């Protein structure tokens, strides 16, 4: 008996079941680590991103361009190399066979690394995939595929089983998508629209639905059309919000019509030059002179007169305008009022403020306004003849430059 008692006394105590309650983790037990980027400062592993844009901006094609780049380990618009991996796509708006696959093929995607979500099996029966209910099932299939770098959800509002304009319901609906991205270690991109009639507001606030869409996402990207330096349209992709990275800058892109295969027309994205400034500055419309801020425009004109003593790169104008507190849309309106010439050079666009008498040639001076000797009148008239000749030469140069400029403009 004594041996039994001794064994009982030496036995390890049975641990009690953890008590219910809040679980706390001490900060000293958390190891700090950097953000892991799929595309540095643009797409982060394990995070939710929103890609928004108006109809016709090509936001879905932009997302597919990202997917194509990932499948082949290609280069991002900034020239950095992408890690190769698999991509999962769910689209409730576009058919894979006649829309999505042709675009991916046209942009050089490795289709063996692209997986489309079509249906979900529940209790042995196939059902249309519902992002608001079937995301937990997707985790298992994605884990089987392995090496998933990107998950596209189009439209992201489909993940919300409730009112997409109510903050609490949107946060609740997006949380499974956030969790899925974190568990997979994949960048999640949800595609959505911009609300109509919101031009001029903060770009992030223009995302359709509750502000929770932008609040839950760690990075918000906007694809849109804006006015180019030559007065035409251009498309830009910008960072509107980034909790984990800088939220300025972007890239031009063009939508080209091409063929995925003979007889299968489609569209593809080609990337252009980087653009500088905040999303609000880049996306600003030349808006309404009805804003009534004539004082700001006049100040911007004075700013340009002082800055454009010599031909100046557009990037420099943007940087100086921002430092001086001038809105870019106001600076553009001021440049139009002053007749600033905008021309393309070897390394980008340049602004030039012509002398007043060249930019706006005046009529010949009236002879009865000339007081003095006949020689002075002759000198004035001779000077006017020279001026007219200079103006004619300048006009020819501008026309030649315009032809070159027009040839550089992408036609959509």
Image (tube, rainbow, N blue to C red):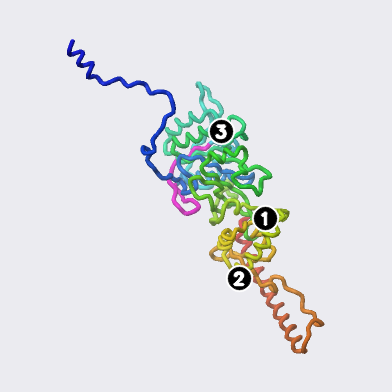
Residue 324 in the image: state x and y as whole percent: 59, 60
Task: Reply yes or no: does residue 385 show up in magenta.
Answer: no
Disc 3 marks which residue?
Answer: 159
Q: Is residue 140 left or right of residue 59?
A: left
In terms of sequence position, does the residue under pointer 2 or pointer 3 come before the other?
3
Q: Which callout, 2 or 1, points to the residue nearer the camera? A: 2
Name the image quarter holding the N terminus: top left
Which structural element holds mark 2?
Answer: loop
- Give the Cα distance between marks 1 and 3: 36 Å
What's the residue at 42%, 39% (across, down)? Answer: 147
Task: Reply yes or no: does residue 84 show up in magenta.
Answer: yes
Which label is found at residue 309?
A: 2
Q: Is residue 112 left or right of residue 212?
A: left
The answer to whether mark 2 and mark 1 are in CB contact below 8 A is no
In terms of sequence position, does the residue under pointer 1 or pointer 3 come before the other?
3
Q: Residue furthest left?
A: 2
What's the residue at 65%, 49% (across, down)? Answer: 200
Which structural element holds mark 1?
Answer: loop
- Give the Cα distance between marks 2 and 3: 55 Å
The answer to whether residue 374 of the structure is visible from this angle is yes
Q: Which residues are magenta?
A: 73-89
Which structural element holds mark 3?
Answer: helix
Residue 333 in the image: state x and y as whole percent: 67, 59
Depth order, front residue of 228/74: 228
Vertical arrangement, residue 4 with respect to residue 164, above or below: above
Q: Residues within 10 Å of mark 2 (few under 14, many from 20)?
A: few
Residue 40 in the image: state x and y as whole percent: 46, 49
What's the residue at 50%, 47% (across, down)? Answer: 42
Which label is found at residue 286?
A: 1
Depth order, front residue of 22/357: 22
What's the residue at 23%, 16% (across, down)? Answer: 8
Q: How many marks?
A: 3
């Amino acid at each position: 008996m004594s041996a039994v008692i001794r064994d009982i006394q030496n036995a390890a105590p049975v641990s009690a079941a953890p008590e219910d309650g809040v679980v706390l983790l001490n900060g000293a037990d958390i190891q700090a680590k950097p953000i892991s980027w799929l595309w540095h400062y643009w797409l982060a592993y394990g995070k939710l991103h929103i890609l928004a844009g108006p109809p016709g901006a090509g936001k879905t094609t932009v997302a597919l361009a990202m997917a194509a780049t990932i499948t082949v380990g290609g280069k991002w618009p900034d020239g950095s190399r992408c890690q190769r991996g698999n991509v999962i796509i769910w689209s409730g708006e576009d058919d894979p066979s006649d829309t999505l696959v042709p675009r991916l093929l046209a942009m050089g995607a490795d289709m063996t690394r692209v997986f489309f979500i079509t249906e979900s099996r529940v209790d042995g029966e196939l059902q249309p995939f519902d992002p608001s209910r079937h995301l937990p099932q997707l985790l298992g299939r994605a884990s089987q595929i392995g090496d998933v770098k990107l998950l596209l959800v189009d439209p992201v509002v489909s993940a919300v089983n409730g009112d997409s304009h109510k903050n609490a319901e949107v946060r609740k609906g997006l949380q499974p998508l956030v969790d899925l991205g974190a568990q997979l270690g994949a960048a999640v991109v949800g595609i959505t629209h911009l609300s109509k009639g919101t031009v001029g507001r903060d770009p992030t606030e223009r995302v359709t639905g509750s502000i929770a869409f932008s609040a839950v996402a760690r990075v918000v990207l906007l694809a849109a059309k804006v006015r180019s330096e030559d007065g035409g349209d251009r498309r830009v992709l910008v960072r509107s919000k980034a909790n984990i990275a800088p939220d300025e800058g972007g890239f031009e892109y063009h939508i080209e019509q091409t063929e995925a295969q003979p007889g299968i027309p489609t569209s593809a994205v080609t990337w252009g030059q980087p653009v500088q400034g905040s999303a609000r500055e880049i996306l600003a419309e030349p808006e309404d002179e009805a804003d009534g801020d004539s004082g700001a425009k006049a100040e911007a004109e004075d700013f340009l007169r002082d800055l454009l003593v010599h031909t100046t790169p557009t990037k420099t104008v943007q940087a100086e305008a921002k430092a001086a507190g001038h809105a870019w849309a106001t600076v553009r309106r001021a440049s139009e009022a002053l007749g600033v010439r905008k021309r393309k050079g070897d390394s980008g666009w340049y602004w030039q403020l012509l002398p007043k008498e060249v930019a706006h040639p005046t009529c010949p001076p009236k002879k009865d306004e000339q007081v003095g000797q006949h020689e002075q009148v002759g000198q004035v008239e001779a000077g006017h003849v020279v001026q007219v000749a200079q103006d004619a030469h300048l006009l020819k140069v501008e026309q030649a430059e315009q032809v070159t400029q027009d040839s550089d403009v992408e036609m959509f």
